[in-house]
Every structure is written in C-alpha cells, then in structure tokens.
Image (tube, grey):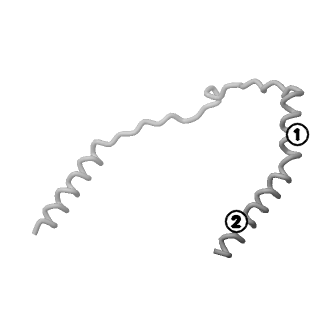
Amino acid sequence: MLAPDLLYHLSSNLEREDLKMNANTNEATLGMITNTNETAEATAGTRLAQNSLLSELPGIVFGLITLGYIVSSLVALA
C-alpha cells in the first residue's frame, strides 16, 4: 500500500524540480579564445635524458618479460 503513495510523492517531486530548473549557457565565441605562447625548446640535458630512457626501454621490457616467466614457472612448480 505504500508503493502508490511513494510513486506519487516521487513523481510530484520530479514535477516540482522540473518547474524550478533553469539553465544559462554561454556560447563559445572567438573573443574567448586566447593566444598561447609555445614553450621553450628542451635543453640538451633534457633531450639526453629522454633519449637515454628510450634506449633503455627494450632492456626494461625484456627484464620484465623474463621476470614474469620466472615467477610463472615457479608458480607452476608449486
């Protein structure tokens, strides 16, 4: 017996909320778009560090695959 009263209460709340709802929007215009300056080029040290990481990446991947193989082999033995 509570279900119809609850549904009426919920539907009346929804109707009241729909009547109160108001939304204001602003359209994007060209005036809102600002110019940004490009960032400075990376220094030699930054480029060296990035290249060193990239050159070490295959070794890291190989090590992780090897470690995964060893762990899975030990788990299979247990």
Residue 2 place in picture, x, y as percent: 12, 65
Residue beneath label 2, please? Answer: 71
Q: How crowded is mark 1: few (under 14 residues within 10 Å), some or many (20 or more)?
A: few
Residue 10 or residue 63, whichever sits in front: 63
Horizontal side, residue 19 vs residue 47: left or right? left
Q: What is the residue that sits farthest to the front in this orientation?
A: 78
Residue 39 or residue 67, whichever sits in front: 67
Whether residue 47 is situated above or below residue 18 in the rendered picture: above
> Looking at the image, which residue is at 23% across and 48% down?
16
Residue 7 place in picture, x, y as percent: 19, 62
Q: Identify the element where label 1 is drawn.
A: helix
Residue 52 or residue 21, whichever sits in front: 52
Which badge, 2 or 1, comes first in the chain's sequence?
1
Q: How crowded is mark 2: few (under 14 residues within 10 Å), some or many (20 or more)?
A: few
Residue beneath label 1, please? Answer: 51
Residue 3 is tagged as none
Residue 41, image quadrant: top right
Amino acid type of the residue that numbered disc 1 sits on in the rendered structure: Asn
Q: Identify the element where label 2 is drawn.
A: helix
Residue 12 or residue 54, whichever sits in front: 54
> Looking at the image, which residue is at 89% across and 33% down?
48
Horizontal side, residue 26 vs residue 37: left or right? left
Whether residue 47 is situated above or below residue 62 in the rendered picture: above
Whether residue 1 is situated above or below residue 26 in the rendered picture: below
Residue 60 place in picture, x, y as percent: 80, 52
> Looking at the image, which residue is at 16% across and 67% down?
3
Q: What is the residue that sits farthest to the left in this orientation?
A: 1
Locate the C terminus and report the quarter of the image it occupies: bottom right
